[in-house]
Image: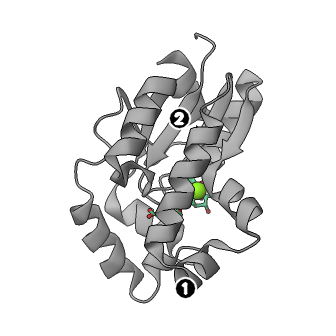
Amino acid sequence: MQSTNIILIGFMGTGKSTVGEQLAQRLHYERCDLDEEIVKATGKTIPQIFAEDGEEIFRQLETNVLRQLVDGNRRVIITGGGAVLRPENVQIMLRHGRVVALTACEQEIIRRVERDQNRPLLQGNVKEKVRELLQARAGAYDFAPVQIDTTGKTIEEIVDEITTA
Ligand SMILES: Nc1ncnc2c1ncn2[C@@H]1O[C@H](COP(=O)(O)OP(=O)(O)O)[C@@H](O)[C@H]1O
Ligand SMILES: O=C(O)C1=C[C@@H](OP(=O)(O)O)[C@@H](O)[C@H](O)C1
Ligand SMILES: [Mg+2]
């Protein structure tokens, strides 16, 4: 595998943060998580940013952090599920790394995110929110040349697939 950045995209709960950590360890790449960098930069949690500043500010922070992180090499850049919504971000990703999309079926996504309170867009009826957002974002992750279905796979199997893709 060439030395460059690997950029993980995918809907919430597809395992970007979990897989990214193992992938970075395996390849001896630096692990960079957009959400974590935003939290560090603002001193606020993600739900706090959404509640106090709104989604638009969060999206701007996401773009700013993405721009900074791609300016490096041998990084596993873990994005949040909505980072692909800005065409500007898609261009940055394609220009600066190998973009890998993780997918999972709807039931599996719901099972994985159900008990997590950290996703402001999924508060309330999680099943309904996931269904609505999956529809609204249909096709948004298709631009990645590598697509990996994570349903029923272990993290190790997914990392294997990414490193051999
Ligand atoms: N392949 C997998 N099989 C089972 N559970 C998984 C898998 N990948 C991630 N998870 C679990 O799903 C939840 C969401 O994973 P996370 O890595 O936070 O996803 P994302 O960053 O894409 O939102 C976590 O509890 C994680 O342990
Ligand atoms: O899909 C989204 O819009 C979001 C996904 C989250 O990251 P994960 O995909 O890691 O859950 C986080 O960035 C924020 O809650 C918004
Ligand atoms: Mg994540």
Name the one closer to the observer, 73 or 18.
73
Q: Mark 1 = which residue?
A: 51
Q: Residue at x 67, y 22 (%)?
A: 73
Name the one closer to the observer, 27 or 3.
3
Residue 117 visible (yes or no): no
Name the amino acid, label 1: Ala
Is 27 rendered above or below residue 124? above
The image position of residue 1, as x and y in percent, is 58, 11
Q: Which mark is residue 7?
A: 2
The image position of residue 43, as x and y in percent, is 77, 70
Name the amino acid, label 2: Ile
Q: Residues within 10 Å of mark 2 (few under 14, many from 20)?
A: many
The colour scheme used here is one colour
For label 2, the SS is: strand
N-term-proximal mark, 1 vs 2: 2
The image position of residue 105, as x and y in percent, is 34, 55
Is 102 rendered above or below residue 157? below
Give the left or right position of residue 49, taking residue 56 as reference: right
Q: Gap between marks 1 and 2, in whole Å?
A: 27 Å
